Amino acid sequence: MHDDGRYDDPRVTGSAGDPVSRETDYPSWSPAGPSRGPSTRPPDCDPVVGRDSGPALPTARPAADGSTRTGNSTGRVIPIRRNTSASARFEPSVPQQPTPDAVPDVAPEPVPVTDTPATPAGAYGPTVTEAAYVSRETPTREEDDPPLAMEAMRAVQILNPSGEVTMPRPERTRVMCVANQKGGVGKTTTTVNLAVALALHGNRVLVVDLDPQGNASTGLNVPHHTGVPDVYDCLINSVPLEEVAQGVEGIPNLWCVPATIDLAGAEIELVSVVARESRLARAIAAYPGHFDYVFIDCPPSLGLLTVNALVAAQEVLIPIQCEYYALEGLNQLINNINLVRQHLNPRLEVSTILLTMYDRRTRLADAVEQDVRNHFGDKVLQAVIPRNVRVSEAPSYGQSVMTYDPGSRGATSYFEAAQEIAERGVKEPVSRNA
């Protein structure tokens, strides 16, 4: 600070030789409250007389250069005069030289706040007016019902507790062999769930477990430990089938011929047996009762057990997993079926293809489905079995997915597949006779 009261600080003086006013802009203050326009009043200034509310009113005294300045006892320059014209209220304040005729200033009028122009319609989305006419509700569909309600409806439809809903019954017994030499494609799961679905809707069904692992027996909760009469006794010892078949608990019209570990040696023992390929066919034909469907669950091989199943059956149901490996061995299975048709069973035909373990999240599943449908045409069922954890959990409780969780996607898909098979069975005799 100089002797004449001037400051070298650029915040106080515009230059070293020109003393300027110390008033600064406070854009957030006005007598009427915060505003967006500029204001020229410090927050501790008296809004009426334009001076500090604490110290005494400044007095004029001569400066060293002969001019008259306004100051207090400390020699600080205190502004008391402001431009109150209209232009000063709308423009930032410009530093001015203090004048000797400074008089108390009146409070400036509050700076008017102008509204921000509205955003043009469509610039960043619909305006409030436009949004009022946009409905956020999607069209009501049957699939949009509450999940619990949909699950309950599916469960009632599948379990059919009243017994009023029935699937079409064929005019003759349909003996279907569920075969695929590749393991893990869903042969046993398909056999068990299709049999249960048909039995729950008025059909008499027999399941023949021809796999030494006995998984079909496990899925139907039928005892198959060592010492239990099983299909091995029918093939090797010529025991009648009705003495081996067991009723499935909780599901009327469903019977199962279990398989034990003894069946693992049946292929070796059948080598020396006369008419070894037709042993199972004769056992089924000799059964005194009438069945609408006989499902034969084959092992994952093309040995004598599978050949017995192909000779005994009239139709072949091939479950195909929606992966590349499942397609790789399909040609060999078709070749074996053709050999059995030519030499052992001229009635045999591939009637049904079922896609299983379909994962809609992958392109591979869609590509496999398109390839299979293009090659087999109408033989492929429209129903597709998706990957569903309920289908895998059900055997651990000795149940099929139809009774374990009838409202699940897996149960619904197998129900649709069974219904489609039943409807085809009614139309087939007419088309063949024609």
Image (cartoon, helix red, strand yellow):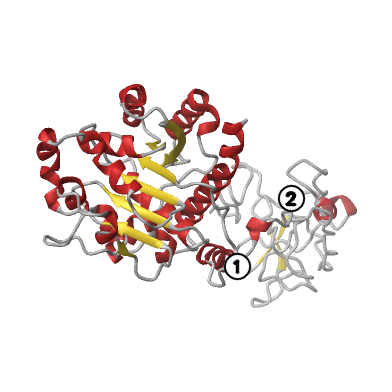
Relative horizontal placement of residue 203, taking residue 54 as reference (left or right): left
Instruction: Tell me if I can see residue 23 in this picture.
Output: no
Residue 272: x %, y % from top left: 10, 34
In the picture, residue 362 is in which quadrant?
top left
Front one among 350 and 170 = 170
Is label 2 or label 1 in front? Answer: 1
Q: Residues within 10 Å of mark 1 (few under 14, many from 20)?
A: few
Instruction: Tell me the residue that label 1 is attached to.
Output: 164
> Callout 2, which amino acid?
Gln
Residue 297 in the image: above or below residue 73: above
Relative horizontal placement of residue 79, taking residue 390 as reference (left or right): right
Instruction: Tell me the residue that label 2 is attached to.
Output: 97
User: Which numbered disc, 2 or 1, marks the residue that appears first in the sequence?
Assistant: 2
Residue lying at 61% horizontally and 37% vertically, measured from the top left: 430
Residue 370: x %, y % from top left: 50, 28
The answer to the question of whether label 2 and label 1 lie on touching residues, with beta carbons closer than 8 A, is no
Q: Secondary structure at mark 1?
A: loop
The quadrant of the image that shows the C terminus is top right
Residue 4 in the image: above or below residue 151: above
Q: CA distance from mark 2 to mark 1?
A: 105 Å
Front one among 45 and 315 = 315
